[in-house]
Image (cartoon, helix red, strand yellow):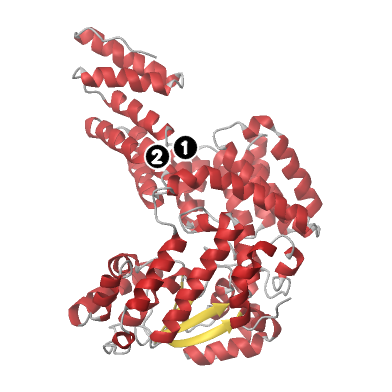
Amino acid sequence: MAVESRPTNAEADTRLVYEVSLAVQAGNLQRAYELAGVALGGGVKHPTLFNARGLWLEQQGRFDDALIEYRRALALAPGESTIHNAIGLCLLQANRLAEAAAAFDAAIVLFPNSAQTHYRRGWALGMLGDHDAAKRAHERAIALKPDFADSLASLASIAATDGYPAKARDYAERALKADPQQATALIAMASADLLEKEYQSAETRLRKLLADAQISSNPRGIIVRARALGLLGDALDGQDKPAEAFTAYTSGNDVLRRMNEPRFAAQQRPVDAAKQLAAAFENTLPHIWQTQEIERQTKNGPKEHVFLLGFVRSGTTLLEQVLATSPNVVDMEERELLNEPAQQYLTSEAGLNALASLDGETLDRHRAHYWNGVREIVGDVEGKVFVDKLPFATIKLPLISKLFPRAKIIFAIRDPRDVVLSCFRRHFEINTTMFEFLALTDGARFYDAVMSLASLYEERLPLDLHKHRYEDMIEDFDGRVRAVCEFIGIEWTDAMRDFGQISRKTEIRSPSAPQVRRGLYGEGAYQWRRYANEIASVLPILQPWVEKFGYPKD
């Protein structure tokens, strides 16, 4: 729609700002954007104008441009909590979760009694995986507004994700009393059904939810649909209907893929980054990795430093929780503390050569930054065995080897077919890495690339490495765990058999939390056989790793 030029007087300026506000309230963001452009072009400066432009740009998926406009609005009205909220919501959509939480923090300082802002802060923290902080934020929202359905539903969702069905049902029922169509609460009820193996009940709930046009049309309807389809797959799997389950998983993943593809279109795919790193590492001279500077004992440092690596869905969370039962172990689950040096040294052949030649103060500086981060997250590690569990840190092994030559590496292995199928079926927060698992072929190729990189590292790096097979631990728990204990220097205790009970009292950041809290069970092994027809297309990609790791072909 064309916008007429405006008369140049103060009354017209005020009127134009008012018209922009009316257009925003009516949801006509394009009209608001155009009017704001006319006003700004004529020299009017008002936060409403920048805010309107930000809203329209955000609607177009132009998050960086939207943030520029919001921050211009904030510069004119730094005490306006609604602008901080707008910035936080935009950052959420851009998957800049820590920054989003900080924006909501700033809004809360200005307006501490906004239940909506506490809810949004909890939403951001939940997506970051900090369930304890997310729960506190939602509980604060409910304290301010006891029937606030969105935060009640979020608490139900967190409880279900953590493996507590009764608590999930309680919160979900309260949310649904306030809003009978609260989709997150309906999803949480279905999740509780699944946890209690009420698969038919879960299927009925989910099919009803998917058929509800009103829920599907709400602003978060796409996410709701994707989540419901994924859980429907779980419900059908529980009824031993693998073909139907696979169709549901595929449909849910396709929804997520279409929704998220624009976010990652301009970024390098992780599979390509892994292949590029492998080529660069292979071009470096093998001998340069064999000479390592002696790592000085860090003041107040651990007795042993252990990295628990592998690939997601390979049993790393299970093993971590077993080891964490020992009073001599301090664990840190899935926290990135090596990203900065990884970006510097692991993105090119020149960077790898520079890494290989590091010594003295530079190494000490990187080590100090890592240990400062560890202490901020987990506290004192002095005299303990410190376990840093982050499966995808596998790609950072040259950096780990250089910075921490004394570290022990536990490399978790599981049947590659189960790993890739599980990644395809599970419900991850979508980031650039997890996006690879939304298509089965992409997940298989990514697995192949990471394992190829890990094998190359094993050949050339002086690693103190112990391979741990998930299936072996299922068959001989005591024997396999004793072997790991011996490797990292802790005593076996009978309490390790009770890790499932103990883990119910702790926060687990991994999507594996509900399975780990069940304790030891064998159903997770060789699930791929039930889906052999559905995953036939990727079996040739995975076969070399099936053979390398010693798994039977069929």
Q: Residue at x 27, y 67 (%)?
A: 344
Q: In the rendered image, which residue does mark 1 sit on?
A: 116
Above or below: residue 389 compared with residue 444: below
Whether residue 281 appears in this view of the structure is yes
- Residue 135, horizontal then vertical, whole percent: 51, 52
Whether residue 386 appears in this view of the structure is no
Front-most of residues 167 and 386: 386
Name the kind of residue labelled 2 in the image.
Cys
Q: CA distance from mark 2 to mark 1?
A: 15 Å
Front-most of residues 57 and 203: 57
**Which of pointers 2 and 1 lies earlier in the amino acid sequence?**
2
Q: Residue at x 64, y 33 (%)?
A: 215
- Residue 385, horizontal then vertical, whole percent: 44, 84
**Are dots 2 and 1 in contact, CB under 8 Å?**
no
Q: In the rendered image, which residue does mark 2 sit on?
A: 90
Above or below: residue 216 compared with residue 397: above
The mark closer to the camera, 2 or 1, is: 2
Q: Residue at x 30, y 13 (%)?
A: 16
